[in-house]
Image: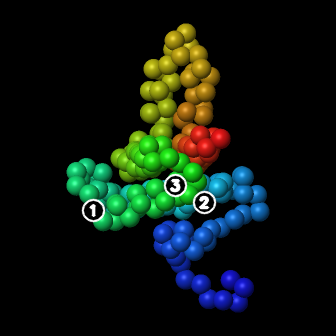
Amino acid sequence: IAGEARRRLSPMQAIERRAAYVPADRKKEALLLPLSIHFNLVLPSLRRLARRHPGAFRIYELYEGSVPAEHRMHEAFHAVLSRAGFCPQDRVRAVRLLLTYAEAFAVDEITGWLDPMDEADRQELAESLSQDDHPCMSAAIAEIETVDPDADFAFGLDALIRGLEAELG
């Protein structure tokens, strides 16, 4: 970049150096609002980790003790939210919210809940929805059957971050 050799940074290194890809249309292609530059680097890495090592990720999810790497990740989140102006109680809640979202999404992804529907799945869903009892879902059946985990994750993360920013008022 600019005549300088670059090596790939870990998400934490990128955060520390404030490095991020900023596309021309950042509202459409990336979510780089004040809080989200940090969270859009770290939280997607949890998904990538889960996809690369699903067994290890499940152990991490079920392990009841704490490990130093987990403390470092939590500390980074607390630091970002503290600098943004969150009080300790709200900061703790926000960290729990963000990590729960990313971890639960990753678990759904590696266990197949977000896999594309095949024809049998589509047919079963359509038959289970009566127009009288489920008019809104019946009208949106094509969208429900279309699965795009990346877009779904980005949408949810953006909504969470916008909500947290609104809390700061």
Q: Residue 82: which disc?
A: 3
x and y, in percent, of residue 20 in the image: 62, 68
Q: CA distance from mark 3 to mark 2?
A: 15 Å
Residue closest to the far right: 24
Q: Badge 3 local density, few (<14 within 10 Å), some, or many (20+)?
A: some
Q: CA distance from mark 1 to mark 3?
A: 22 Å
x and y, in percent, of residue 112 in the image: 39, 45
Identify the element where label 3 is drawn.
helix
Question: Would residue 136 appear left or right of 43 to someone viewing this image?
Answer: right
If the image is split into quadrants, where does the C terminus sit? top right
Residue beneath disc 2:
37
Callout 1 amino acid: Val
Residue closest to the far top: 132
Residue at x 44% of width, y 27% of height: 124
Callout 3 amino acid: Ser
Residue beneath disc 1:
67
User: In this picture, is 140 found above or below 105?
Assistant: above
The quarter holding residue 38 reads bottom right
